[in-house]
Image (cartoon, rainbow, N blue to C red):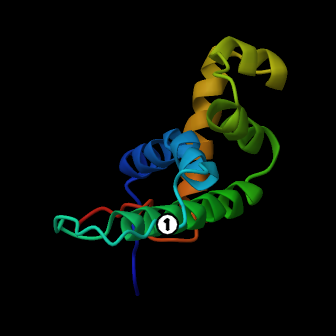
Amino acid sequence: MFIFDIDEYKSRQQADKLLTQYWRLKHVVTSTSSLQSPAYSHTPKPLKNGNGMERRTVKTIEARQTLGYIDVALSQITGINGGLLKMQYLSAGKLTVSYICDELGLTASSFKKHKKQALLEFAESYPSEGLLIFKEH
């Protein structure tokens, strides 16, 4: 029998870290400068390590995939917890905790409890590896 003990604290940290990157990922995906047509010239250029356009393309694809994973995970979290994560991390403007509490009808202490639970639910729902951290036995 397999026993998987989730390290809830570390899993919540990973979820928070990823969700905090949401707007950076969004910017990478929507930036018009991230993918451009190559410019051709007959002038020799110095050799560089790697291809800058290729790296940007890969970063854009990875960011788009990660945003898709975030959307999938968030769609599985309903109610107050889902609303809390969306307001806290995905709002275009930085919303204060007191504003979120007023909108969701929470007290400051219940906000903390719901946020901890919501981050863990997000880590469990995230369709790719890396957010759920397991305890070592």
| Closer to us: 30 or 22 | 30
Task: Name the residue: 41% across, 43% down.
Answer: 13
Q: Mark 1 points at which residue?
A: 62
- Image vertical order of residue 99 relative to residue 9, above or below: above
Q: Identify the image quadrant of residue 17.
A: top left
Task: Check disc 1 and give the amino acid type.
Answer: Glu
Tell me where residue 100 sits by quadrant: top right
> Residue at 59% of width from left, 43% of height from top?
117
| Residue at the extreme bottom of the image, as rendered | 1
Which residue sits furthest top? 98
Q: Quadrant of residue 56?
A: bottom left
What number of labels is visible? 1
62 to the left or right of 107: left
Residue 102 position, x and y percent, is 80, 15
Q: x and y percent of residue 89 in the render?
A: 62, 36
Instruction: Say which element carries label 1.
Output: helix
Q: Is residue 9 left or right of residue 92?
A: left
Residue at image position (74%, 60%) is 76
The residue lying toward the viewer, choosing from 60 and 129, is 60
Viewer-proximal residue among 35 and 47: 47
Quarter that holds the C terminus? bottom left
In-image side of 103 versus 11 (left or right): right
Q: Where is residue 111 in the image (x, y as percent from the top left)?
A: 65, 25
Q: In this view, does 58 lie to the left or right of 87?
A: left
* Mark 1 surroundings within 10 Å by alpha-carbon count, few (fewer than 14), some (14 through 19), many (20 or more): some
Q: In which quarter of the image is the N terminus?
A: bottom left
Q: Which residue is drawn at 42% across and 52% down?
A: 11
Q: Nearer the viewer, residue 18 or 60?
A: 60
